[in-house]
Image: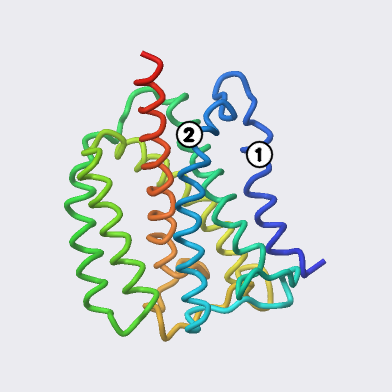
Amino acid sequence: MERYLYFGVLLFAISYPLAQSFEHRIRYASKWGQLFPGMLITALFFIVWDIWFTKIGVWVFNPTYITGIFLGNLPIEEILFFFIIPFACVFIYEVLIYFFPKDYFQPLGKPFVFVLVPILFGMGILHLDKWYTSVNFLIGSVTLMIHYLIFKDRYLGRFIFAYLVHLIPLFLCNGILTGGMTEEPVVIYNNAENLGVRIWTVPIEDTIYSMTLFLMNISFFEHLRSQKTIQLT
Protein backbone atom coordinates (compact mmCIF):
# COMPACT_ATOMS: atom_id res chain seq x y z
CA MET A 1 0.00 0.00 0.00
CA GLU A 2 2.97 2.35 0.43
CA ARG A 3 3.25 2.78 -3.32
CA TYR A 4 -0.18 4.44 -3.36
CA LEU A 5 0.66 7.11 -0.78
CA TYR A 6 1.06 10.01 -3.21
CA PHE A 7 -2.08 8.92 -5.05
CA GLY A 8 -3.89 8.71 -1.71
CA VAL A 9 -2.93 12.29 -0.84
CA LEU A 10 -4.37 13.46 -4.17
CA LEU A 11 -7.54 11.44 -3.60
CA PHE A 12 -7.91 13.06 -0.18
CA ALA A 13 -7.43 16.53 -1.68
CA ILE A 14 -10.07 16.14 -4.38
CA SER A 15 -12.66 13.96 -2.65
CA TYR A 16 -14.65 16.62 -0.80
CA PRO A 17 -14.54 19.34 -3.52
CA LEU A 18 -15.60 16.80 -6.14
CA ALA A 19 -18.37 15.36 -3.96
CA GLN A 20 -19.70 18.88 -3.26
CA SER A 21 -19.41 20.15 -6.83
CA PHE A 22 -23.10 19.62 -7.48
CA GLU A 23 -24.26 21.09 -4.16
CA HIS A 24 -27.08 23.55 -4.88
CA ARG A 25 -25.58 26.58 -3.14
CA ILE A 26 -22.04 26.71 -4.50
CA ARG A 27 -22.89 25.01 -7.83
CA TYR A 28 -19.19 24.46 -8.50
CA ALA A 29 -19.84 22.07 -11.40
CA SER A 30 -21.66 24.82 -13.29
CA LYS A 31 -18.40 26.81 -13.30
CA TRP A 32 -16.14 24.10 -14.70
CA GLY A 33 -16.40 25.60 -18.18
CA GLN A 34 -14.58 28.69 -16.90
CA LEU A 35 -12.24 26.67 -14.68
CA PHE A 36 -10.84 23.93 -16.90
CA PRO A 37 -9.29 25.94 -19.79
CA GLY A 38 -7.14 28.01 -17.44
CA MET A 39 -6.36 24.94 -15.37
CA LEU A 40 -5.00 23.20 -18.46
CA ILE A 41 -2.82 26.17 -19.48
CA THR A 42 -1.47 26.57 -15.95
CA ALA A 43 -0.85 22.84 -15.59
CA LEU A 44 1.14 22.74 -18.83
CA PHE A 45 3.32 25.60 -17.58
CA PHE A 46 3.98 23.90 -14.25
CA ILE A 47 4.56 20.48 -15.81
CA VAL A 48 7.29 21.91 -18.06
CA TRP A 49 8.79 23.62 -15.00
CA ASP A 50 8.59 20.34 -13.06
CA ILE A 51 10.20 18.33 -15.86
CA TRP A 52 13.10 20.77 -15.92
CA PHE A 53 13.58 20.82 -12.14
CA THR A 54 13.44 17.04 -11.97
CA LYS A 55 15.99 16.78 -14.76
CA ILE A 56 18.49 19.08 -13.03
CA GLY A 57 17.97 17.43 -9.63
CA VAL A 58 16.08 20.10 -7.70
CA TRP A 59 13.86 17.26 -6.47
CA VAL A 60 13.36 13.56 -7.06
CA PHE A 61 10.49 11.18 -6.38
CA ASN A 62 10.80 8.30 -3.96
CA PRO A 63 9.84 5.08 -5.82
CA THR A 64 8.57 3.56 -2.56
CA TYR A 65 5.54 5.84 -2.47
CA ILE A 66 4.47 6.14 -6.11
CA THR A 67 2.74 3.72 -8.45
CA GLY A 68 5.66 3.65 -10.91
CA ILE A 69 3.66 4.99 -13.86
CA PHE A 70 5.67 7.77 -15.52
CA LEU A 71 5.08 10.26 -18.29
CA GLY A 72 8.54 11.41 -19.26
CA ASN A 73 10.50 11.84 -16.06
CA LEU A 74 7.43 12.64 -13.93
CA PRO A 75 5.27 10.13 -12.05
CA ILE A 76 1.62 10.25 -13.04
CA GLU A 77 0.77 11.47 -9.53
CA GLU A 78 2.90 14.58 -10.04
CA ILE A 79 1.08 15.42 -13.27
CA LEU A 80 -2.31 14.89 -11.64
CA PHE A 81 -1.18 17.22 -8.85
CA PHE A 82 -1.39 20.23 -11.17
CA PHE A 83 -5.04 19.50 -11.93
CA ILE A 84 -6.31 18.19 -8.61
CA ILE A 85 -4.79 20.81 -6.31
CA PRO A 86 -6.03 23.81 -8.34
CA PHE A 87 -9.47 22.18 -8.56
CA ALA A 88 -9.56 21.99 -4.76
CA CYS A 89 -8.10 25.48 -4.29
CA VAL A 90 -10.62 27.21 -6.55
CA PHE A 91 -13.34 25.30 -4.72
CA ILE A 92 -12.12 26.89 -1.47
CA TYR A 93 -12.16 30.28 -3.23
CA GLU A 94 -15.77 29.79 -4.36
CA VAL A 95 -16.97 28.49 -0.99
CA LEU A 96 -15.51 31.52 0.80
CA ILE A 97 -17.16 33.90 -1.67
CA TYR A 98 -20.52 32.27 -0.96
CA PHE A 99 -20.26 32.19 2.82
CA PHE A 100 -18.48 35.55 3.17
CA PRO A 101 -20.13 37.85 0.60
CA LYS A 102 -18.26 40.89 1.90
CA ASP A 103 -14.70 41.14 0.60
CA TYR A 104 -13.00 41.69 3.96
CA PHE A 105 -9.47 41.49 2.56
CA GLN A 106 -10.03 43.88 -0.36
CA PRO A 107 -8.10 46.74 1.34
CA LEU A 108 -5.06 44.46 1.57
CA GLY A 109 -4.92 43.72 -2.17
CA LYS A 110 -2.72 46.61 -3.27
CA PRO A 111 -0.36 46.46 -0.22
CA PHE A 112 -0.08 42.70 -0.76
CA VAL A 113 1.27 43.31 -4.26
CA PHE A 114 3.47 46.29 -3.51
CA VAL A 115 5.11 44.61 -0.52
CA LEU A 116 5.37 41.03 -1.72
CA VAL A 117 6.50 41.65 -5.32
CA PRO A 118 9.74 43.48 -4.41
CA ILE A 119 10.46 41.05 -1.57
CA LEU A 120 10.07 38.02 -3.84
CA PHE A 121 11.98 39.63 -6.69
CA GLY A 122 14.79 40.70 -4.37
CA MET A 123 15.02 37.28 -2.73
CA GLY A 124 15.05 35.66 -6.15
CA ILE A 125 17.97 37.82 -7.29
CA LEU A 126 19.87 37.36 -4.02
CA HIS A 127 19.63 33.55 -4.26
CA LEU A 128 20.45 32.89 -7.90
CA ASP A 129 22.65 30.03 -6.70
CA LYS A 130 19.54 28.16 -5.47
CA TRP A 131 17.32 27.06 -8.34
CA TYR A 132 14.11 26.44 -6.41
CA THR A 133 14.32 29.62 -4.38
CA SER A 134 15.35 31.87 -7.24
CA VAL A 135 13.07 30.63 -10.03
CA ASN A 136 10.12 30.16 -7.68
CA PHE A 137 10.33 33.63 -6.14
CA LEU A 138 10.97 35.38 -9.46
CA ILE A 139 8.05 33.65 -11.18
CA GLY A 140 5.86 34.34 -8.15
CA SER A 141 6.68 38.06 -8.25
CA VAL A 142 6.08 38.30 -12.00
CA THR A 143 2.77 36.39 -11.77
CA LEU A 144 1.52 38.62 -8.98
CA MET A 145 2.50 41.79 -10.82
CA ILE A 146 0.92 40.65 -14.11
CA HIS A 147 -2.29 39.79 -12.27
CA TYR A 148 -2.35 43.25 -10.71
CA LEU A 149 -1.63 45.04 -13.99
CA ILE A 150 -4.56 43.24 -15.63
CA PHE A 151 -7.12 43.10 -12.85
CA LYS A 152 -5.87 45.71 -10.34
CA ASP A 153 -7.12 44.65 -6.89
CA ARG A 154 -10.53 43.41 -8.10
CA TYR A 155 -9.97 39.79 -7.03
CA LEU A 156 -6.96 40.05 -4.74
CA GLY A 157 -8.93 40.36 -1.50
CA ARG A 158 -10.86 37.20 -2.28
CA PHE A 159 -7.64 35.50 -3.34
CA ILE A 160 -5.75 36.46 -0.17
CA PHE A 161 -8.55 35.08 2.00
CA ALA A 162 -8.65 31.80 0.06
CA TYR A 163 -4.86 31.60 -0.01
CA LEU A 164 -4.61 31.91 3.77
CA VAL A 165 -7.28 29.23 4.26
CA HIS A 166 -5.64 26.92 1.72
CA LEU A 167 -2.40 26.96 3.73
CA ILE A 168 -4.02 24.54 6.18
CA PRO A 169 -4.53 21.70 3.66
CA LEU A 170 -1.29 22.74 1.94
CA PHE A 171 0.81 22.03 5.01
CA LEU A 172 -1.11 18.83 5.68
CA CYS A 173 -0.75 17.41 2.16
CA ASN A 174 2.75 18.72 1.47
CA GLY A 175 3.79 17.73 4.97
CA ILE A 176 2.89 14.14 4.15
CA LEU A 177 4.68 14.36 0.78
CA THR A 178 7.83 15.79 2.37
CA GLY A 179 8.19 13.12 5.04
CA GLY A 180 6.13 14.46 7.92
CA MET A 181 4.47 11.09 8.52
CA THR A 182 6.75 8.62 6.77
CA GLU A 183 10.30 7.36 7.24
CA GLU A 184 11.32 8.93 3.93
CA PRO A 185 9.79 11.77 1.89
CA VAL A 186 7.68 11.09 -1.16
CA VAL A 187 9.22 14.12 -2.84
CA ILE A 188 12.89 14.50 -1.92
CA TYR A 189 14.12 18.09 -2.20
CA ASN A 190 17.75 18.90 -2.88
CA ASN A 191 18.45 21.30 -0.02
CA ALA A 192 21.33 22.86 -1.93
CA GLU A 193 18.66 24.38 -4.19
CA ASN A 194 16.46 25.95 -1.49
CA LEU A 195 16.84 28.08 1.63
CA GLY A 196 16.64 25.12 3.99
CA VAL A 197 13.85 26.81 5.95
CA ARG A 198 10.95 24.45 6.61
CA ILE A 199 7.56 24.70 8.28
CA TRP A 200 7.10 21.23 9.71
CA THR A 201 8.75 19.37 6.83
CA VAL A 202 7.53 21.72 4.08
CA PRO A 203 10.11 24.01 2.41
CA ILE A 204 9.15 27.67 2.80
CA GLU A 205 9.36 28.01 -0.98
CA ASP A 206 6.32 25.75 -1.34
CA THR A 207 4.10 28.52 0.02
CA ILE A 208 5.09 30.75 -2.92
CA TYR A 209 4.97 27.90 -5.43
CA SER A 210 1.43 27.18 -4.31
CA MET A 211 0.53 30.86 -4.39
CA THR A 212 1.62 31.11 -8.01
CA LEU A 213 -0.23 27.95 -9.01
CA PHE A 214 -3.38 29.16 -7.24
CA LEU A 215 -3.22 32.73 -8.56
CA MET A 216 -2.68 31.68 -12.17
CA ASN A 217 -5.80 29.54 -11.99
CA ILE A 218 -7.82 32.33 -10.38
CA SER A 219 -6.65 34.79 -13.05
CA PHE A 220 -7.83 32.59 -15.91
CA PHE A 221 -10.98 31.56 -14.04
CA GLU A 222 -12.10 35.10 -13.28
CA HIS A 223 -11.24 36.32 -16.78
CA LEU A 224 -13.32 33.59 -18.40
CA ARG A 225 -16.12 34.11 -15.90
CA SER A 226 -16.23 37.83 -16.69
CA GLN A 227 -16.31 37.06 -20.42
CA LYS A 228 -19.27 34.75 -19.90
CA THR A 229 -21.06 37.42 -17.89
CA ILE A 230 -20.55 39.95 -20.71
CA GLN A 231 -21.93 37.48 -23.27
CA LEU A 232 -25.02 36.88 -21.16
CA THR A 233 -25.80 40.60 -20.76
Q: What residue is disc 1 on? A: 16
- Give the residue at x 48% y 34%: 34
Q: What quarter of the picture does the N terminus occupy?
A: bottom right
Q: Which residue is farthest top?
A: 233
Percent position of residue 88, x then y:
56, 44
- Quote the CA–CA distance across marks 2 and 1: 20 Å
Percent position of residue 74, x then y:
61, 71
Q: Which amino acid does label 1 sit on?
A: Tyr
Question: Which mark is first along the chain, 1 or 2?
Answer: 1
Q: What residue type is labelled 2?
A: Gln
- Give the residue at x 40% y 16%: 232
- Give the residue at x 57% y 24%: 27
For residue 71, above or below residue 190? above
Task: From the viewer's side, name the closer residue of 170 and 74.
Answer: 74
Left or right relative to 171: residue 7: right
- Give the residue at x 31% y 35%: 155
Q: Which residue is farthest right?
A: 1
Left or right relative to 62: residue 35: left
Q: Quadrant of residue 19?
A: top right
Q: Tell me, what colour scheme is on the image?
A: rainbow
Q: What quarter of the picture does the C terminus occupy?
A: top left
Q: What residue is disc 2 on? A: 34
